[in-house]
Image (cartoon, grey):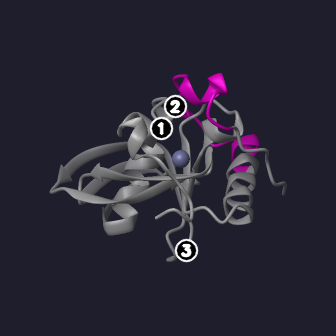
């Protein structure tokens, strides 16, 4: 396993479209393990493949309840509204209050390529929306005014 380099704001790969996973090859399995290791090393709650320079639809999340791996994730329903503070490993040291759906349901494949659905609320709903945005080249800083972005510690 390996800790991968995390790309930061300004790197083109963060803005590019991603390809769906057709088959979970050994290479993809290794990438998933490396992404998990990278997320834990950086103490993040989630990581999407473009953040490590890979244009594929892979997301890993851990909001404190253990790892979740999502391939080709798609939000199939959203409900309610929630505003809370959010950061991103690709925008180090910065945070902002971001409006998101309070509850989401997501359809995806797991690390073995099996379809599953997951419902999230609170932090998990936020992480799902944030990471799936990454697969479409969207960062949370796109969803707020620049003046709303603050430095960690200035809260
Ligand atoms: Zn992010």
Question: Mark 2 falls on what kind of element?
Answer: loop
Residue drawn where x is 39% and y is 64% of the image: 124
**What is the C-alpha distance between the residues marked 2 and 1?**
19 Å
Asked if disc 1 is less than 8 Å from ligand 1, the answer is: yes
Q: Alpha-carbon neighbours of circle 1 within 10 Å: few (<14), some, or many (≥20)?
A: many
> Helix, strand or loop at disc 3?
loop
Residue 27 seen in render:
yes
**Magenta region: which residues?**
8-29
Residue ID for mark 1: 139
Q: Where is residue 112 in the image (x, y as percent from the top left)?
A: 58, 54
> From the viewer's perspective, is residue 13 above or below residue 34?
above
72 vs 1, left or right, is left
Pick whichever of labels 1 and 3 is earlier in the sequence.
3
Mark 2 surroundings: few (<14), some (14-19) or many (≥20) residues within 10 A:
some
- The numbered mark at residue 20 is 2
Q: Which of the two marks, 2 or 1, is nearer to us in this view?
A: 1
Front position among marks 3 and 2: 3
Residue 73 in view, yes or no: no
| Residue with the mark numbered 3 | 66
- Give whichever of 94, 43 is nearer the camera: 94
Magenta highlight: main SS? loop
Farthest residue, direction left: 80
Kindly check if marks 1 and 3 are in contact, taking CB atoms under 8 A apart as contact.
no
How many circles with numbers are drawn on the protein? Answer: 3
Cα distance between the residues tagged 1 and 3: 24 Å
Crowd rating for badge 3 (residues with CA inside 10 Å; few <14, some 14–19, many 20+): few
Tell me, for residue 149, which label it has, or none: none
Depth order, front residue of 34/91: 91
Q: Where in the figure is residue 93, as x and y percent of width and height? A: 62, 54
Q: Residue at x 51, y 62 (%)?
A: 154
Q: Which residue appears at 69% of the width and 65% of the height?
A: 40
């Amino acid at each position: 396993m390996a800790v991968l380099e995390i790309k930061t704001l300004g790197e083109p790969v963060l803005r590019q479209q991603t390809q769906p996973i057709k088959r979970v090859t050994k290479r993809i399995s290794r990438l998933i393990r490396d992404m998990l290791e990278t997320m834990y090393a950086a103490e993040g709650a989630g990581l999407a493949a473009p953040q490590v320079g890979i244009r594929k639809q892979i997301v890993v999340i851990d909001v404190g309840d253990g790892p979740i791996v999502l391939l080709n994730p798609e939000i199939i329903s959203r409900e309610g509204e929630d505003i809370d503070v959010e950061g991103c490993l690709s925008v180090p040291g910065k945070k902002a209050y971001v409006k998101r759906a309070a509850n989401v349901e997501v359809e995806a494949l797991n690390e073995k390529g099996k379809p599953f659905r997951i419902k999230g609320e609170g932090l998990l709903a936020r992480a799902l929306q944030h990471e799936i945005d990454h697969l479409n080249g969207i960062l949370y800083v796109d969803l707020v005014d620049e003046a709303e972005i603050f430095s960690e510690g200035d809260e």
